Image (cartoon, grey):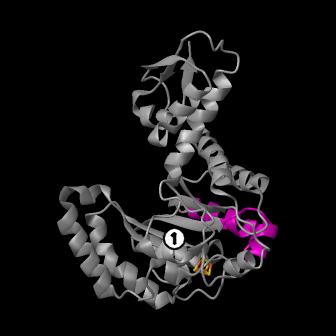
Amino acid sequence: MPHNGCPHQCSFCNQKNITGQSYQPTKEDVKNILEKAVNDLGDKAQNAEIAFFGGSFTAIDRDYMITLIEAAKPYTKIFTGIRISTRPDYIDEEVLDILKKYNVTSIELGAQSMDNFVLKANNRGHNSDDVMRASRLIKSYGFSLGLQMMTGLYTSTYDKDIYTAKKFIELNPDTVRIYPTVIMKETELANLYLSGDFVPYTLEQSVDLCSKLILMFEKADIKIIRLGLHYSDSLVKNSLGNNYHPAFKELCENRIFYNSFIEKTNSVDKSKTFTVYINEKSLSKFYGQKKCNLNCFTEMGYTFEIKFDNTLEKYDLYIK
Ligand code: SF4
């Protein structure tokens, strides 16, 4: 969905650049896309969802919104359901009744931060109370709730981003998405960046923060369905600041193992060989991209062998 019907102008938003298009889909487009998806996916369609993403779905013209979900509804017999994303201040009983009627199953809220100062500084036009109210209402209707946060927004800090994650956990969403802030050209954030008023997190700071967020949500049993924006040529071409990485999640997972290894080997005698136990599926995460973790550990003077203990959770390790 393009930036359709949204009366706001969040500091970071240039919807045209994020979605790579400004075309407004019609009901025929929805039907054609879904027919093609059914053909392409075959049996796999029963495990896939229909999604209206990129704009504020419940903020668009009501008749147009209904036209789109009406076109998608017959396909909910084939797909698992319909997922939409919207703003927290465009959720009320009236719209939830409509979404229920058309077999929408999951609602994601662009909360972005739970710090009111950060929300205001980034022109979000809603506050953290809106997020809490909308989240509770969505859950009371039985929809799956998703919450989206942006780390490193203008005026945010490491502690404020951790605070947002804690408030999310209290709301107990089914899923979260975490988007480190990417500065899109032709946005207020770009102006702030170019004038020197906004200094974004470095990639290193973002990896450090988000590796901790992964562990927080993991511990709370909340699924992270996305960490970092999807790569697109348009995103790279239209962004500033050099802090976007296409394999961001992988970098964060590598960092989790790096930190854990350093913590657990704190009191290990480096002259002795020891064994690191991890889940077999975590081997590449433990090694790190281009074996960066492994090379670091070796350079630090550690000698160890790796063995598998598949009873371990994916980010756990222990040493013997
Ligand atoms: S509410 Fe969403 S679509 Fe509207 S300006 Fe903000 S980010 Fe863009």
The quadrant of the picture showing ligand 1 is bottom right
On screen, residue 205 above or below 51: above
**Residue 95 occupies which quadrant of the picture?**
bottom right
Q: Which residues are magenta?
A: 112-139
Is residue 117 rendered magenta in the image? yes
| Residue type (three-letter) at the residue carrying disc 1 | Ser
Disc 1: CA contacts within 10 A as few (<14), some (14-19) or many (>=20): many
Can residue 98 be seen at all in this image of the molecule?
A: no
Q: Position of residue 275 (x, y in %)?
A: 51, 15
**Residue 13 occupies which quadrant of the picture?**
bottom right
Q: Residue furthest top?
A: 272
Q: Return the residue at label 1.
A: 85
Q: Position of residue 100 (x, y in %)?
A: 45, 70
Is residue 68 rendered magenta in the image? no
Q: Residue at x 77, y 68 (%)?
A: 118
Helix, strand or loop at label 1? It is strand
Q: Between 130 and 189, which is closer to the camera in this rendering? A: 189
> Magenta part mainly helix, strand or loop?
helix
Q: Position of residue 131 (x, y in %)?
A: 68, 66
Quick check: 282 left or right of 302? left
Q: Position of residue 265 (x, y in %)?
A: 64, 21
Q: Between 303 and 142, which is closer to the camera in this rendering? A: 303
Which quadrant of the figure contains the N terminus? bottom left
On screen, residue 286 above or below 111: above
**Residue 299 occupies which quadrant of the picture?**
top right
